[in-house]
Image: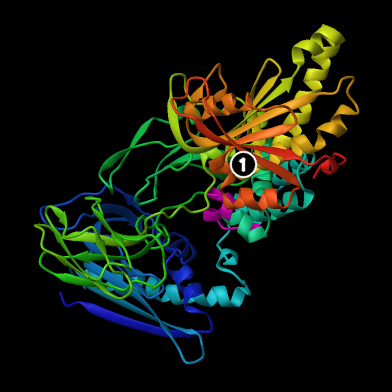
């Protein structure tokens, strides 16, 4: 049958980046224009051809069709193409290309090119009845955005079925949430979000995107979402993210369901489920409040992998050109599935690469201009130009489990017994009450125990207010965890600053030693509690022992961080560098003692 090609063009008073964010977010766009959801099988490859996924759907909810969907090809902010080869149904082949161009009025011209190859006469009818109207709705999606008055893509209108919302239950649970220790304004914002946003937005609530939409601090959003989950407004889940393609591979409803390894069919490799990189927290509206589903229309589009700047299929013996933006850091070319990669380095003179069955012809390429890549291997390949060190601002398991609210509200959320997951970066704080033995001797057991308990509350308050949590108490000592080193340092400074004020209410003058250390660790289930073990924990405990009282001992690595420098520069402190040999540690550790000036003692206040 003869192919049919249709070209649609329209100009919009929007910048190209905004139009790209709208049209390259295929799942969100396809939901809005009313396309049918799709089920995808794992990636397959036939012979030397490029890999594909089999997709299955029902047109108009009735007619089943299936096809092979090949990897999207795109250049960020410029164009993308998707190709489908049909296995069943009245169509044989389909490609859609979306191109964006600047126009004279600082707007964007959108060009859609849809090419259909019908299998039979019925296919021509299918083009007019369903396929072509769907392509036209793509332009309508941009029109709807303009007419909505939205100022950012996050505010783009979405279809909402009011019939699926239990408004009385939403009102009741929102009122219950308002009684929690959270900002009332955020409760109202969450209420409107759950009532007004589209199904996709409420079925997959990403805390980072919500924080951007509300223009508020991420930690504050996390707190209200955690309390909302406890109140019954939301459910939480844990997504396992592939470190290469950065796409969610599996979703678990509990930390206890996490496995130490997982497989990515797209990359063809097994990975360890790293706690602070590959395990992310997501929320969804509770089904008693609203029935909503994050329908899947696409699993390989540009906005699903936003760290990828460009992606192309290069057939055997062919050459493709990639445009590399000048000044972008840590870029690399990677062959999908094979995972062979080569870095982009402006100091390298060559801007040509060859890919063979043995891998890349060189280890780096110049990225200050177009890069030509030739495929001399025995198979077609898919090459991605991506940020090598890209890490979206996601809420990882390491971050949320370091929050006191999470431990207080979800104490049963722990790993399964015997399970252990690595954490590349965690900050551990140990505190010690100096002279506690003498305190028990002079004050008596009952009085001393009461003061120790009160000092635990004092420490927990400052740790929690700085995005940390108490892991456990050991006698009169506390072990706390923080996701970021600067949060641990903030908490330590606040504790020493405000200890004198606390002592005014105590019967004895308490003196604290604090030790802070950052590094890798493992997360485990210890007595039904999420705990941490490893060299970082051992060193943090040992350097706390180097304290003299009223000070903070930390590693020089923590001191060297820009955030730490800024914190200490804004405080009146004295620094003393020294080296210490710690028990059980092979080499001497370079440390810094931080002492606060006496005139920095201030009245304790809750922020």
Q: Is residue 484 at least partly visible in the picture?
A: no
Name, please, the residue furthest toward the bottom: 104
Drawn side of residue 412 relative to residue 358, left or right = right
Residue at 15% across, 74% down? 1
> What residue is shown with label 1?
234
Q: Secondary structure at mark 1?
A: strand
Secondary structure mostly taken by the magenta-highlighted segment of the chain: helix
Whether residue 204 is in magenta: the answer is yes
Residue 507 falls in which quadrant of the image? top right
Residue at 75% across, 24% down? 456
Residue 121 falls in which quadrant of the image? bottom left
Whether residue 279 is in magenta: the answer is no
Say which of 567 and 545 sits in front. Answer: 545
Drawn side of residue 33 relative to residue 500, left or right = left
Q: How is the image coloured?
A: rainbow
Residue 110 falls in which quadrant of the image? bottom left
Say which of 418 and 98 sits in front. Answer: 418
Quadrant position of the C terminus in the picture: top right
Residue at 46% across, 67% down? 33
Residue 63 position (above or below residue 312): above
Residue 575 position (above or below residue 347): above
Q: Is residue 245 at least partly visible in the picture?
A: yes
The boundaries of the magenta stretch are: 196-208
User: Where does residue 126 sit, x and y in percent of width and height?
Assistant: 29, 69
């Amino acid at each position: 049958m003869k192919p049919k090609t249709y070209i649609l063009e329209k100009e919009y008073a929007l910048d190209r980046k905004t139009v790209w964010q709208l049209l390259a977010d295929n799942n969100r766009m396809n939901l809005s224009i009313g396309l049918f959801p799709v089920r995808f099988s794992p990636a397959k490859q036939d012979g030397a051809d490029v890999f594909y996924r089999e997709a299955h759907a029902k047109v108009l909810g009735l007619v089943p069709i299936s096809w092979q969907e090949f990897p999207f090809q795109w250049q960020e902010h410029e164009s993308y193409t998707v190709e489908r080869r049909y296995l069943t149904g009245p169509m044989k082949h389909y490609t859609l290309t979306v191109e964006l161009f600047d126009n004279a009025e600082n707007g964007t011209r959108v060009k859609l090119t849809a090419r259909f190859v019908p299998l039979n006469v019925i296919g021509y009818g299918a083009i007019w009845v369903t396929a072509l109207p769907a392509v036209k709705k793509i332009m309508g999606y941009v029109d709807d955005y303009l007419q909505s008055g939205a100022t950012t893509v996050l505010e783009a209108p979405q279809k909402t079925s009011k019939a699926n919302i239990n408004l009385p239950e939403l009102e009741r649970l929102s009122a219950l949430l308002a009684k929690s220790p959270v900002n009332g304004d955020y409760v109202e914002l969450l209420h409107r979000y759950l009532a007004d946003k589209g199904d996709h937005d409420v079925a997959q609530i990403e805390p980072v995107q919500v924080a951007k939409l509300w223009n508020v601090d991420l930690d504050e959003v996390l707190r209200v979402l955690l309390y909302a989950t406890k109140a019954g407004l939301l459910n939480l889940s844990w997504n396992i993210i592939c470190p290469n393609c950065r796409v969610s591979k599996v979703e678990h409803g509990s930390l206890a369901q996490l496995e130490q390894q997982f497989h990515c069919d797209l990359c063809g490799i097994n990975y360890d489920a790293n706690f602070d990189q590959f395990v992310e927290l997501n929320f969804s509206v509770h089904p008693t409040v609203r029935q909503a589903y994050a329908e899947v229309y696409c699993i390989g589009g540009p906005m699903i992998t936003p760290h990828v700047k460009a992606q192309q299929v290069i057939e055997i013996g062919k050459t493709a050109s990639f445009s590399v933006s000048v000044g972008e850091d840590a870029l690399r070319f990677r062959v999908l599935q094979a995972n062979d990669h080569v870095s982009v380095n402006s100091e390298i003179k060559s801007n040509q690469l060859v890919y063979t069955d043995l891998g890349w012809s060189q280890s780096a390429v110049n990225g200050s201009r177009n890069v030509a890549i030739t495929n001399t291997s025995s198979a077609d390949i898919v090459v991605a130009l991506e940020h090598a060190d890209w890490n979206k601002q996601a809420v990882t398991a390491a971050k949320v489990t370091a929050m006191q609210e999470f431990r207080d509200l979800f104490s049963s959320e722990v790993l399964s017994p015997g399970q252990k997951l690595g954490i590349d970066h965690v900050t551990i704080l140990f505190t010690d009450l100096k002279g506690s033995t003498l305190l028990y001797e002079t004050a008596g057991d009952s009085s001393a125990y009461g003061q120790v308990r009160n000092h635990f509350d004092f420490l927990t308050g400052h740790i929690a207010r700085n995005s940390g949590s108490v892991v456990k108490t050991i006698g009169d000592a506390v072990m706390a965890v923080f996701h970021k080193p600067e949060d641990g340092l903030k908490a330590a400074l606040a504790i020493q600053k405000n200890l004198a004020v606390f002592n005014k209410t105590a019967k004895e003058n308490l003196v604290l030693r604090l030790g802070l250390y950052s590094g890798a660790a493992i997360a485990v289930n210890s007595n039904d509690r999420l705990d941490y073990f490893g060299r970082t924990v051992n060193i943090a405990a040992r350097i706390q022992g180097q304290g003299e009282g009223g000070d903070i001992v930390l590693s020089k690595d923590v001191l060297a961080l820009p955030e730490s420098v800024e914190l200490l520069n804004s405080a009146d402190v004295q620094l003393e560098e020294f080296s210490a040999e710690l028990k059980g540690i092979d080499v001497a550790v370079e440390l810094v003692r931080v002492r606060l000036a006496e005139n920095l003692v201030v009245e304790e206040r809750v922020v």
